[in-house]
């Protein structure tokens, strides 16, 4: 209960212990008598470590099962989305990250009194003092040389830091701090970089979170749909709702194999949904013109109109590209024009936006 208060009020272990001792409402919530003292911060640290991720997962799963037994968690649709969470630590660029790594390794060498030659120390200090405008390639070369010199001369913690620095240099790993291995640089939009994490969430139609996964900020939620659905009860899901980032062939094949409907909009071509109507295997334009045939293509169908009926008809000006003589409309599996069930699924997807906004505004996510 103290950990719940710590999260809700954004308190540290020390601060929550003091707050429970002083705040009578906190004390009542934790089930303590008026003259009973709260657990100290060290106890909270040990408890959290002993409880571990599996412990928290067990509590979460048990809560969801109770919700379902009481009849609150309803519906056979699952809604997926992810939201960015900014890290408390400030993200560094590659130059400053590598310098910070060198400083941390030298500090560990000093604390542990590890044997290190004066030459290696001098080379390390020289790299720290490198001006920011010096070419990054030269800094990377110097760090690699330092790693070779430090090989076998440092403790496990320093080896972890050196390994992360190596990943940054060789593989372009997008971490921003060596004290937080899970935070990474990602993008909320094309012009808005975020340093932190992504919380991947699954909701039911009653707005209950049924499972979640915390990802590094550079991870793509769209490639993790199968991981999230596999955690759900087998055979109890009718459909999955998500935004266009989940529109991949792998995701649609996975859902189809498991007998789950994909209520996921197409990444492209959604502007014609309200202009054309799919009826009896043919496409009808709002003016009444009907397609005369179709060609089966991968993941969909290409419907085409008569050049006489739909060749610059004026109702939908500019729709025919240069060189075309007739209108063609591609309908992917994700674009069922005026399909009632599909439109319902897409509408339900908006629920998750309200839930995420509530979590961020009121619960500090």
Image (cartoon, grey):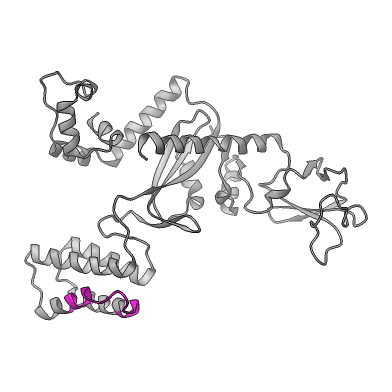
Instruction: Look at the image and tell me in which quarter the C terminus lies.
Output: top left
Q: Which residue lies furthest to the right in this view?
A: 308
Residue 2 in percent (x, y) is at: 22, 31
Tell me the residue at 11%/26% (across/down): 37
Tell me the residue at 41%/29% (across/down): 64
Comparing 228 with 230, the one in front is: 228
Residue 295: in magenta span = no
Give the total of numbered labels. 0
Residue 5 in percent (x, y) is at: 26, 31
Q: In this view, does 67 lie to the left or right of 306?
A: left
Tell me the residue at 70%/34% (across/down): 340
Comparing 50 with 322, the one in front is: 322
Residue 84 in percent (x, y) is at: 42, 48
Task: Give the vertical position of 267 relative to 41 (above or below).
Answer: below
Instruction: Look at the image and tell me in which quarter the N terminus lies.
Output: top left
Q: Give the range drawn in magenta.
A: 123-138
Residue 124 in percent (x, y) is at: 18, 75
Q: Is residue 311 left or right of residue 182?
A: right
Task: Give the vertical position of 115 relative to 68 (above or below).
Answer: below
Task: Give the vertical position of 175 relative to 170 (above or below).
Answer: above
Comparing 244 with 303, the one in front is: 244
């Amino acid at each position: 209960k103290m950990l719940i208060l710590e999260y809700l009020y954004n308190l540290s272990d020390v601060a929550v212990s003091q707050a429970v001792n002083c705040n009578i409402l906190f004390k009542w919530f934790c089930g303590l008598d008026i003259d009973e003292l709260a657990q100290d911060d060290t106890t909270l640290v040990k408890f959290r470590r002993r409880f571990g991720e599996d412990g928290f997962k067990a509590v979460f799963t048990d809560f969801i099962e109770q919700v379902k037994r009481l009849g609150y968690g309803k519906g056979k649709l699952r809604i997926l989305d992810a939201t960015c969470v900014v890290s408390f630590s400030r993200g560094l660029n590659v130059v400053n990250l590598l310098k910070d790594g060198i400083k941390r390794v030298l500090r560990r060498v000093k604390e542990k009194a590890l044997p290190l030659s004066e030459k290696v120390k001098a080379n390390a200090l020289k790299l720290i003092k490198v001006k920011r405008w010096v070419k990054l390639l030269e800094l990377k070369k110097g760090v690699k040389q330092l790693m070779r010199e430090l090989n076998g001369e440092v403790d496990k913690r320093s080896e972890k830091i050196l390994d992360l620095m190596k990943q940054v240099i060789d593989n372009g790993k997008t971490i921003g701090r060596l004290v937080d291995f899970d935070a990474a640089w990602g993008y909320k939009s094309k012009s808005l970089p975020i340093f932190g994490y992504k919380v991947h969430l699954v909701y039911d139609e009653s707005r209950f979170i049924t499972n979640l996964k915390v990802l590094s900020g550079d991870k793509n939620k769209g490639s993790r749909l199968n991981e999230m659905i596999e955690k759900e009860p087998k055979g109890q899901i009718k459909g999955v709702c998500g935004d266009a980032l989940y529109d991949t062939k792998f995701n649609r094949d996975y859902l189809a194999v498991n007998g789950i409907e994909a209520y996921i909009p197409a990444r492209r071509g959604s502007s014609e949904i309200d202009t054309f109507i799919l009826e009896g295997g043919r496409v009808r334009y709002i003016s009444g013109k009907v397609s005369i045939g179709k060609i089966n293509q991968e993941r969909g169908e290409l419907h085409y109109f008569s050049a006489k009926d739909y060749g610059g008809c004026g109702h939908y000006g500019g729709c025919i590209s240069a060189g075309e003589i007739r209108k063609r409309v591609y309908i992917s599996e994700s674009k069922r024009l005026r399909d009632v069930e599909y439109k319902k699924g897409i509408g339900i997807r908006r629920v998750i936006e309200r839930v995420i906004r509530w979590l961020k505004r009121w619960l500090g996510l």
